[in-house]
Every structure is written in C-alpha cells, then in structure tokens.
Amino acid sequence: MKVLSPREAAIFASLADAVAMPEPPLPPVRGTDAVEGFDAWLAAAPRENRAAVRASLLGLGTRLRGRDRSERVAILRALEGTPGAAPLMEALRAAAAAAYYGDDAVLRRLGYDAAERVRRGDVLRAAKATPPEAAPPAAVSPAGGVVDLSGFSGRRTVHADVAVIGSGAGGAVVAKELAEAGARVVIVEEGVAHDAAEFTARPRDMLPRLYRDAAQHATIGRPPILLPLGKAVGGTTLVNSGTCFRTPDRVLARWREEFGLDLDLAPHFERVERELNVVRVPPELAGANAHVARRGAEALGWSGGFVERNVRGCAGSGVCAFGCPTNAKQHVGVTYIPKAHAAGATTYTGVTARRIGRGGVEATTGGGGRLGVEAERIVVAAGAIHTPALLARNRLGNRNLGRHLSLHPATAAFAVMPEVIDMARGVPQSYFIDEFASEGIMLEGIAGPPDYVAMGLPVAGERHRELMEDYRHLAQFGLMISDDTRGRVHSLGGRPVVRYDLTETDAARVRTGLQRLDELFRAAGATSVLLPPAHKLIAFHPLGSARMDARPGHGVLDAHQRVHGTDNVYVCDGSAVPSSLGVNPQITIMTLATRLAAHLCRS
Ligand SMILES: Cc1cc2nc3c(=O)[nH]c(=O)nc-3n(C[C@H](O)[C@H](O)[C@H](O)COP(=O)(O)OP(=O)(O)OC[C@H]3O[C@@H](n4cnc5c(N)ncnc54)[C@H](O)[C@@H]3O)c2cc1C
Ligand code: SF4
C-alpha cells in the first residue's frame, strides 16, 4: 500500500463490502483489487484530502466494527444525513463503490471489456498511421517539439517572443497561431505529454494520470462541488467529451450590452472548427443511451439534436473522459500543439510557472530545477482556477481578480430501461436537449464504464448491487445550469482555493432540471428512474475568474485580453470568458484565443 495502513485498508474493505454488497457470481471484495485501486487513487490526491480520508476511515472503523453488512449500510446512511459529515461520507461511499467495480474481472462480468477497447484502439491507430516513407518531410525547426523537464534539477534559460503558460484550449491555440505567424513561442506546461497507446480505458488508471489531483479537487461552499481539471499537454481538452457549441447569440448580445464587448467571432469560430474537424455525431455512433433521450424528447416534443464534436474516425469507444484509445478525439494536444511545434514552438513539460515579470516567466520543474523563459510578451492560459492564483501571486490584476467565477454546475440521473443499453458503447455525450436553455437548463448525454456508474449511483447495499447487476440496462442523462451564482478563486500562497455558494435561484434550476430528466426517462419508457440528491454536483466548466470587460474598473482584462495595469501580459483561457455560457465552452475559449493571436500579430 502506498498510503493506507493495514487497519485503514481493512476498514475500507469493510466499507466497500457494505456499499457494493457483492453476492456470487460477483467476487467478494477480498477477491478483487478494490483496496489497492483506492490506495493508488488516494496516493495521487492532494495531501489534505488524504489526511481527511484517512481520519474519516479510522472514525468509521470504530463504528463499523462487529456490524453486519446491513448495519454498516445503515450507519453510513445515518452519517450521510449528518450535517458536516455528509460530503465526506458521500465521497467515501462513491469511492468504495468505484473501487470495487473498477476491478477488471468485475468490469468484464458486467459486460465491459477495457482490454478489447484498447486492442481496437491499437488497430484503428495503426490503420490511420502514415507509413514513414509516405510521410511528408517534417517541417519541424530544430527548436520545435516537447522537452520534458519533469526530472530536471538544473537551471536553464530560454528565449522567446511569447511565453505561453498552459497548453490547454486557450494556450495551445494562441501558441500555434502565433508560431505560424512567425513568432518564437515557448509553452510551459505543468503536466506531461501522453500518447493514446498508454490509455487503458479504465477510469481507475487514467484519473490519476490525466487529471490534476486525480480529479479530487472540490470547491468550498454550499454545497461543495467536485471540479475536475485536466493536467497534460492538451489541458482539459485531453479528457473532455469533445462537444462543440458556438457561443450562443443571446450570450454575445449580453456581452455587447453589459460588458461593452462587441466581438466579431464568426470567422474565428470557422477557423477553430476547421482545425478541430468539428462534425455532427452520426446516429449510428451515438449509442443506445442517446437514443433513449432522443425517444423521450421526441415523445415530449422537446427540442434537441445530435451533438457536434471534434473527432476524426471516432469509433464510439465510450471513454472520452479517460483518454481516447483510438486518438479520434481531436483535442488540442493532437491538433494545435503539433502544428505549433511544426512552426518552431517548444513545449516544456513538467514545469510550473511561478513568477511573471516584465522580462518573462520563471518556472520550477518536478525535479526541483528552474526554467527561465525570457520573453517580451506573456500569455497566461493556466485555466480559470490556476490563472487567477498565478496572477495574484505576482500581484497582477485588480480587485476583480478571482471574482465572477461561474461553473455550470452539473448532475445526472439514471434510469433502468427494458432494453439493453450498454451505455459505454457509443459516444458518451452525443445528444443534447436545449428546450429549457432560455431558463438556464441544458440537458446533455453522459455515460461511462461500470465503475464510473457505481460511483454515481445514489444508493448503497442491496439496491446498489441490484442496479449494478442491471448495468447493461442502465441509461444516464445529465443536466447543467447556466449559473447566476458567482464564486471566487482565492490564492493561498499561490495555490487556488475556490469558494462558491449556490444561490437559491440556481439550486431551483438544478431541481427543475432533475424533474425534467425524470419526465424524459419516463416518456422514453423507463422502468424506474433514480435522481441524485440535488446538492450532489460536479462542474466541468469554470469560467470568468479574470474576465474581459471593456468597461474600465469592471474586468481584469481589457477588450483584447490584456491584463489591466500591464503592457505585456495577456490571459487566454476560461478565466477570460466574461460570463456563464449555458453551453460547453471549449470552442468559445479557442475562438477567443484565435482572436487574441490575430490581435497580437497586428500590434
Ligand atoms: C471531464 C470534462 C469534460 C468536458 N467536456 C467538454 C466538452 O465536451 N466540450 C467543451 O466545450 N468543454 C468541455 N469541458 C471543458 C473544457 O475542456 C475546458 O473548459 C477547457 O479545456 C478549458 O480550457 P483552458 O484553456 O481554460 O484550460 P485547460 O484546458 O484546463 O488548460 C490549462 C492548462 O494549464 C496548465 N497549468 C495550470 N497551471 C499551470 C502553471 N502554473 N504552469 C504551467 N502550466 C499550468 C494545466 O496543467 C493545463 O494543462 C470538459 C471538462 C471536463 C473536466
Ligand atoms: S467515443 Fe470518445 S473515446 Fe471513443 S473513439 Fe470516440 S472520441 Fe474516442
């Protein structure tokens, strides 16, 4: 064990046994690698999470000792109803369920064969690969490419016209556009580059590798909200669902009227969509899960459709959020970044930017070394949570910094369907329902392998087992709200801490959205519907924490994304987006990055 003591491991096993309550033919917890899987996941968690989990396990151990399974479940339920203890207990229950169902033999018993997806990915990637003799001569300059400094312990200084911090949706795009325009570009990225050949189609393996803090970061507030972020070359686009929505006209109108931002984004959107190969999901790849939602929406007369996505040769492997094994997803790590490199840019990975000054960027490496990037201009693209913390640490920005954070809080409902769904076959997010978009509620597909489902089911014990035995018949559909709540990113010694208290209006939107999901599934013929508690939320779209605003004194950035009070520092990521969008934000961020690059080239 990397983290758990033998006593803590035994308590976790007892918890997993109560939550999953396996009966033959499912193996007992001790016959699986549930505890080892949980231990590895915990090892990648932030230190404070590890400490809280271990302390809770020890506390729980005293209560669970000598109790039978049903008594243990009852104790857990009581604790989940106790103010203060509830969020941690819910998280432990979810982790215990995921740990048990993440065992490979258990996954296969439920019809999910991760190895088969990996093999199919290998075949599809090999078929797409260009034979070396047919490949065009590489246009890579001697400087272009990835330099991994994760283990580097020395000091190095490099020179550039532009230093870009972060290689996600914003950073990769601005880097490629500037490099192709002839600028010397250096990207610093805290994560590392990943190859699709490493992806195992198992959430347990991929969460610690591709996500920051193994996807265990949460907000502080009422309620705490899980906030997963990617950390890799490609940023969060590496783990996202590939859904592409342009900024809605109603939002652009609001930006014009409220923030004085009259943005002509159409040509930039077209450019981004060409680079990413944005195409509509064909119905035959959408998966049975999407067809349940479509059937329900059509029966109710609700407006919706198949999603547009950035993919090339998608095979419907169903694991976009855990690394696409076929490399079909056209995330920026396989689109913009290679083009930036071909135009001479260099990405230094395993490097964390710490200091931003007139002369450039100073960064530290995973191995205790230092990288200095001397550059005339700096583009901060560390994402809506890390950018404000980094600016605050460097005393950049004004009193708006960190404020105005929106999240698009999200949740999802499950339904038991009469027909086989196999929700992890097909594109997980392939259908949307925008009937309630004007009320700030968007319904979108979501799906995943059995361990992902086990984690999300809002029950424990026998009912959990019954539902998991019915995994092949389970359908799921999600909702996200266009939030009016505004949170704040604080910087504690340079580390971001997010405070976000959901307003009653937004909480009501979540409750209404859940009722709509209930109606949707019933109209589609569900045998039963499971709604999560309305306070159990996750958020995938942090935005606005260093917002652009043409009105002096209202934003952190001017209308060209320059940080007020500086003449050479720009921000180009989710934090620049002025308000909640109501739709998935990746191509809005990329479009603003394209616009920024055009502006920097002109000026
Ligand atoms: C599971 C999931 C599914 C999603 N699905 C969709 C979807 O289908 N469609 C959609 O539009 N959006 C989706 N999103 C959201 C979308 O991916 C993000 O909004 C977008 O990637 C944010 O772009 P960004 O440039 O702000 O930050 P990111 O893409 O997160 O990139 C920031 C990068 O900066 C790096 N970094 C941070 N701090 C530092 C530092 N100090 N030094 C160096 N590097 C640093 C990080 O490691 C990271 O790689 C999803 C998000 C998640 C989590
Ligand atoms: S569904 Fe997602 S993971 Fe599967 S091939 Fe398509 S993009 Fe890749």
Image (tube, grey):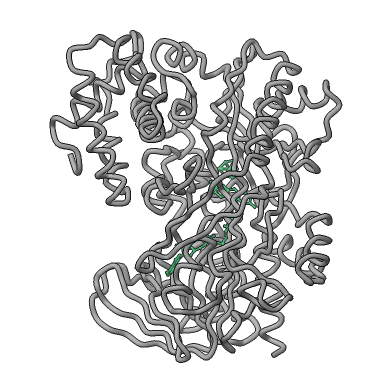
Please tell me whether residue 494 is drawn above or below residue 116 in the rendered image.
below
Q: Quadrant of ligand 2?
A: top right
Q: Nearer the viewer, residue 556 or 458?
A: 556
Residue 122 in sight in this render: no
Residue 300 location, x and y as percent?
Answer: 83, 23
Q: Residue furthest left?
A: 6
**Quarter of the figure with residue 503:** top right
Q: Residue at x 59, y 50 (%)?
A: 407
Left or right position of 16 against 485: left
Residue 587 in sight in this render: yes
Point out the image quarter for the C terminus: bottom right
Point out the image quarter for the N terminus: top left
Q: Nearer the viewer, residue 434 or 67?
A: 67
Q: Residue at x 29, y 35 (%)?
A: 37
**Quarter of the figure with residue 80:** top left
Please tell me whether residue 527 is drawn above or below residue 378 in the rendered image.
above
Q: Residue at x 14, y 30 (%)?
A: 7
Q: Nearer the viewer, residue 83 or 41?
A: 83
Residue 419 location, x and y as percent?
Answer: 64, 13
Q: Residue furthest right?
A: 301
